[in-house]
Every structure is written in C-alpha cells, then in structure tokens.
Amino acid sequence: MSKQTPSNPSSFALPHVARLHAYTPGLQPTEPGWVKLNTNECPYPPSPRVAEALRQEIGSDGAALRLYPNPKSTPLRTAVAKLHARECPGLREDQVIIGNGSDDILNLLVRAFIGGTADTCRAGSPDPAGKPSARESAGSGDPALRQSAGAAFTWPSYSLYPVLVGIQDGRAETIEFDRSMRLPVERIAHSKAKLIFLTSPNAPTGVGFTNAEFERVLAGYGGLFVVDEAYAPFANENAIPLLAQYRNLIVVRTLSKAYALAGLRVGYALAHPEIVDLLDRVRDSYNVNRLSQAAALAALGDEAYHAGLVAKVKATRDVAIADFARRRGWFTYPSQSNFVFTEPKTARGDTGPAVAKSAYDFLYARKVLVRYFPSHALTAPFLRISVGTDAEMRVLSETLDVWQKAPE
C-alpha cells in the first residue's frame, strides 16, 4: 500500500501555533557601509579579555569543541552571584540561572508558568508587528478575562512577550502606558495575572522606573513580577537590591548591550532558589555553549572596561538627547538606556506618523538605519535611535539636518 502524502503539512500544526506570528527582529544588513543604529547593540567591542578567553578556550586545534559545555554554566552562575552580591548581600549561586541570551530566560519563565490548560482559556496571537490581538488581550476591563490571564505586560514594550505567551497558548493581559510613560502602579499591582513582565528601562522609550515604584507594585501584587533589565547598566538604579525582600521578584539581565556580547547570546536571571529550580527543570540541556560561557566570564571579570564602556555610551546618549530636544526642539523622552526615542519635527513644525516615516525613509535611503514602530498610536510618531559611536551619531545628525531642509 502506498503512503499518502498530505497536501498541506502545516495542517498538522497545533491550532494556536498555526495562527501565531513570529517575532520580527530589527534589520541586520549584510552589505557594508551602513550606519547601524536600529537594534541597540553596543557600538564598541567587548573587553580585550573576551578575545583572549575565546582563543584559550578554542586552543591551537579546537579540540575542546568536541566536548559539551558545563551543563548548568556553574562557574558563570558563581561569577554572577559574586558580582551582584554587592547590591544584594547574601546573593547565592542557587539564585542565578544562565540562558542563551535573556530571551531564553523569558522563554523559560513562560514555559514554566504559562499554558493554555493551566490558564483555563486560549490565547490569540500577536499581529505581525508584535502587538497583542484583541482576542489575546485581557486588559479590556472584563473581570473574567482579567482573572484568567496567565501573563501580563505593559505596552508598548518588548514585542517578544506576546509571542512567547502565544507559543504556550496562554492568555495575556496588556497594561497600556499613556504618553506620559508614568508607571501604572495600581493597575499592575491589582492584576490577576500570575506573571507580569516589565521592561525597565522601558523599550522603546528608554524611560526608567524607580525601586520605590516597584515596591508599591510588590506590596499589592501576589504573582511573579519579572523586571526585564536589559538596559539597566545605563540606568539610574536597578531592582536587584529588592531581591532580598521579595520572593516573587525576578530580575532578568543580558550581556548583549552593556557587555557587547550580542553575537554570543548570554543572559541570566536572579530569583528565589525555588524559582530557579523550576526554571532549571524546563531549561534545555547544555543551553549555553562553551565559547559563550568563557566569553561571559571574561567580560564580567573586566569591571573597569565595562564601566568605561557604559560611561562612553551614556555620554554620547546625553549629547544626542540635547541635540534632539534643545537644538531641534523635538519631544524626546529622558532616556536611561542605550537608545533615544524622539519625535521628528519638520521645518514647519509638523509631527506625526507620516513625519516619522518620512524621516525613517530618508535615513534608510542614505544607509542610516534606525527603528520605526508604526503599529501603536504612542510609538508611531517617533523614531528609536540606538546610541552609536560619536562619529556615527554625527552622520545621523547631519543627515537629519538635510532631511529637515528638504522640500516637503
């Protein structure tokens, strides 16, 4: 008997996966000549110790690569605990988990705590731009929907969150910011979701939040509160000191931004040992390769280089904010990150989504790449611009000068 070949193999997909839209990362051009200011990468190389550590790990013949890496990244867990024990005295290795980038950590959190069956109702999917769909959002005010939400996140924010929840067939509650970008503390504290993601500083605006605000949230919220601190090294404060007081707090970090290791994918979370134990149960085996572990240990060990790199980025960022806000008169959020969120204005004083798109297209045509987020009313009039080198930022500024002077 001959086998029948299905006419549509995708018909075997789980229904919630079939309607899922994948996360869309920023453009990564392969040809030379671009001024790349669109994905918040570090404009400078990592510590010289990183390259040396990689050479030593590979060795003269690469023989070490035939061996699996440390399965739990144990030396790296120890180093991370030691690093942050200054901010949270008594922090231990069993409060640290290492991931293949912080996205891996976020995925583990959703995998461990969110699911269609556990949440009693089914998620929709984000649209192609990453915004939660109406079916997915439980933030409409319906108490039944709010109670059933497995995860919640403020919005606009990191568009991977709804994708991860959708993969698990979970339901998400969105807690909307307004233009003031003040943290909606009461709405977060009263959420019925079992897990809340908050990016601090916020992406894409760069606005930072305070530990006093987090404590007000944690005083009223009974679920797991995840503070995604991808950009915290550039901020005024971070949530790590609160870990000793709140068992339901999880702090997520990455080495992609402030340590210049985006290409090696290393992230970690700090949490109560019981939470780390649960995440370890759903973690992929050997989830961080041996070269990434070696590079991360070297980067964390060169604190002077790290401090200098962060200081350079912050100085360039502050110059850029002054250029946008004071010289051009563009509304620009006070950034505590390694990017700037600014509202372009024409020479006539016009602003809005069409103006932002015009500026984006003008820059793109001249190989200056930034980010434009048209899918949300708050973000559509703005451009998000990663902090580059001083030379790259001068090219950006000069190109925007030409755009403003061009005939409308």
Image: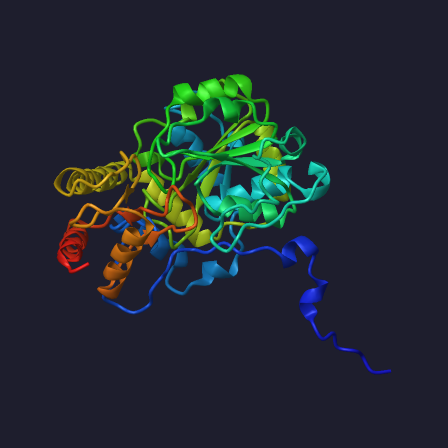
Is residue 6 placed above or below 383 in the rendered structure? below
- Residue at 70% from the left image edge and 40% from the top image edge: 121
Quarter placement of the N terminus: bottom right
Note whether residue 249 is visible: yes
Q: Position of residue 34 (x, y in %)?
A: 25, 63
Q: Residue 13 lies in what quarter of the image? A: bottom right
- Front residue (pair 220, 62): 220
Q: Is 311 on the left-hand or right-hand side of 116?
A: left
Q: Is 135 on the left-hand or right-hand side of 313?
A: right
Q: Residue 56 lies in what quarter of the image? A: bottom left
Is residue 39 placed above or below 183 in the rendered structure? below
Q: Position of residue 173 (x, y in %)?
A: 57, 36
- Front residue (pair 148, 227): 148
Q: Is 185 on the left-hand or right-hand side of 126?
A: left
- Front residue (pair 131, 307): 131
Quarter placement of the C terminus: bottom left
Q: Is 351 on the left-hand or right-hand side of 264?
A: left
Q: Which residue ends up furthest to the right in the rendered image?
A: 1
Q: Residue 31 lies in what quarter of the image? A: bottom left
Q: Position of residue 348 (x, y in %)?
A: 17, 48
Q: Which colour scheme appears in the figure?
A: rainbow
Note whether residue 49 is visible: no
Q: Which residue ends up furthest to the bottom in the rendered image?
A: 2
- Residue at 61% from the left image edge and 50% from the top image edge: 167
Count of all numbered marks drawn on residues in the image: 0
Q: Position of residue 225 (x, y in %)?
A: 52, 29
- Residue at 42% from the left image edge and 46% from the top image edge: 376
